[in-house]
Amino acid sequence: MATIEVVAPRQYVRGPRRGPITRLLEDERWLATCLMLPTVVLLGLFIAYPFVKGIMLSVTDTTVGVPGKFVGLANFEKIWNDDIFRLAVWNTCVYTFVTTVFKLALGLWLALLLNRHFRGKAFMRAFILLPFIIPTVLSTFAWKWMFDPTFSVLNYLLFHLGLIHGRINWLGDPVLAMISVIIVNVWRGVPFYAISLLAGLQTISPELHEAAAIDGARAWARFRHVTWPLLLPVTLVIVLFSVIQTFADFQLVYVLTGGGPANATQLFATYAYQLGIGTGLLSQGAAISLAIFPILLLVVIVQLVYIRRAETL
Amino acid sequence: MIEGAPWRRWIFFYVPVTGFVVALLFPFYWMIITTVRPDRELYRPWNAPNYAPFWTMHPTLDHVRDLLTTTLFSTWMLNTMIISLAATAISLFCGLLAGYALSRLKFPFAGMIGTGIFITYLVPQTLLFIPLSDIIRNFKLGDSPWALILTYPTFLIPFCTWLLMGYFKSIPKELEECARIDGATRWKAMLYIIFPVAIPGILSAGIFAFTLSWNEFIYALVFLSSPEQKTVPVGVTSELVRGDVFYWGELMAGALLGSIPVAFVYSFFVEYYVSGITGSVKG
């Protein structure tokens, strides 16, 4: 016979006294306000305020140390009629488009190569990311040295492979300079695309591939009808990030060519720097930087709409 | 694996993978070999008959020595380290609190603030550097590490918040509710229950934030002016190039040494870093 032990109910004990601050933090709204405060203050002070300030600067004729007066849209009119600005717009578009196409194609290829089991895979993945994590300015200097007209190792390589017969002046010729800048940007961006796409590929169940293979689909058909549609949403997000970063790129061009020769590689950001900081025309520089904004906004909206649609499919 | 004959495996796998690896890593090899190559070999035209680019018989550490003794390189390293660590700490602090609030608490304007943070995540530094330089000057922060310690979080916080929100959302609500039933306050439940569980996320965000701060260029270029205040990327760009003369040996030594802290942190936490990247795009 089991004995039933009767446990006397514990007497109700009041919790430890809580101070007024603790009680205030028990309220969800107050806690949330306190938690959001540092973030909102920092972002307000150094993102929202500069943004407003940038708009205000762009409608005055401020230069360094000289507070300007209101001039309306004169700065925008001036840059619109500026040949160098138009060239910078064109260059930025070419640069963004060409690099994005190459980064996506090569990144996808590399991701597909890495998406299988082989020895040393983790090791290789770690090394492949190096171009992306090493400070861009520092690795771009290595490229600048490789492109050096007199000491170029690339010329040596191409010459001994029989692909060229004379020297190539990589950074001195307008077209070649643009190609050089594009090469370095692609080199730096491919690892990011590859690793991100690889993460996307790994979420695709191998059973889908096996099912398609049983149904007789060859490798290309499997990629076209199974992998690609499933990879599309993550691809769009990656492209969105990359396009914005590339569009606003500065450091790579600043180090490699400084926008030259003869503005052949001048981008929005390098031109804004040259005018705003280099010559001290703050208001014109601010106007040029702001010209990035509508285009970025457009890219963001287009991409967000597409992503939402792709996700609801 | 590739199906079919071994030659298919070579064509479709080994050859392209080798090509990618060589192309992606060659510039780093070139950095190393330039650093240890003596000047008399370095400045030999590429079409000279004795140009032997891929190795050297006379390795030297002269360039490293010059870099450390005749330039302010070690000061720049220290500056960059302090600024990166401080900016990372501030961003993690803000990101943790904001990420928790946005993923767990209900409060007015939560959705609006969340969208706002997402948009600031997309704002590139090059959009705001000119008005920001004016603001920094007005706040009397110019040419001091504080200019960077306070502005770097603007592009790190959105990222940290976004990444940590994802982590917090994956932690079951019951865990927190249990603690609250046991008498923990909201604050304590957050501090002692939720944050420890999110440590992998905090590590990812921290490592990513550290490498991004180490990488940052345009703010450091615009806000700092005296040589002893500069960070590594800016110092190497502006002080190792005198006029039109490039000191390539020292430059490559600087590029190599300046990359080491990032590579070091990265090598220990590759998995966290990769999950940081993938987390940053998945959102």
Image: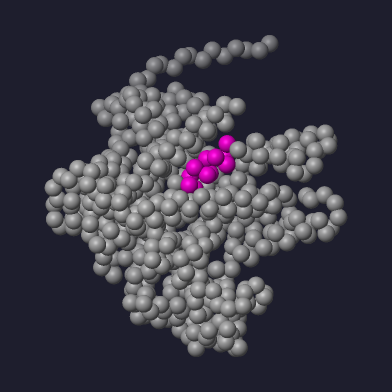
Q: Main secondary structure of the magenta part?
A: helix
**Position in image of residue A300 (x %, y %):** 44, 38
Where on the picture, by quarter, is residue A11?
top left
Q: Is residue B233 visible?
A: no
Where on the picture, by quarter, is residue A279?
bottom left
Q: How many marks?
A: 0
Q: Is residue A198 above or below residue B52?
A: above
Q: Which residues are magenta?
A: A233-243
Q: Nearer the viewer, residue A127 or B81?
A: A127
- Left or right placement of residue A218 versus residue A63 in this view: right
- Measuring 40% from the left and 42% from the top, which residue is drawn there? A295
Q: Nearer the viewer, residue B235 or A233?
A: A233
- Measuring 48% from the left and 45% from the top, which residue is drawn there? A241
Magenta highlight on residue A19: no
Q: Is residue A139 above or below residue A95?
A: below
Q: Residue furthest right?
A: B5
- Left or right placement of residue B32 versus residue A22 in this view: right
**Position in image of residue A53 (x %, y %):** 23, 44
Q: Nearer the viewer, residue B67 or A13?
A: B67
- Left or right placement of residue A151 versus residue B187 in this view: right
Magenta highlight on residue A240: yes
- Measuring 49% from the left and 84% from the top, which residue is drawn there? B43
Q: Specify the color scheme.
A: one colour
Q: Is residue B130 above or below residue B170?
A: below
**Position in image of residue A219 (x %, y %):** 77, 44
Q: Is residue B3 above or below residue A301?
A: below
**Position in image of residue B77 (x %, y %):** 38, 67
Q: Is residue A182 visible?
A: yes
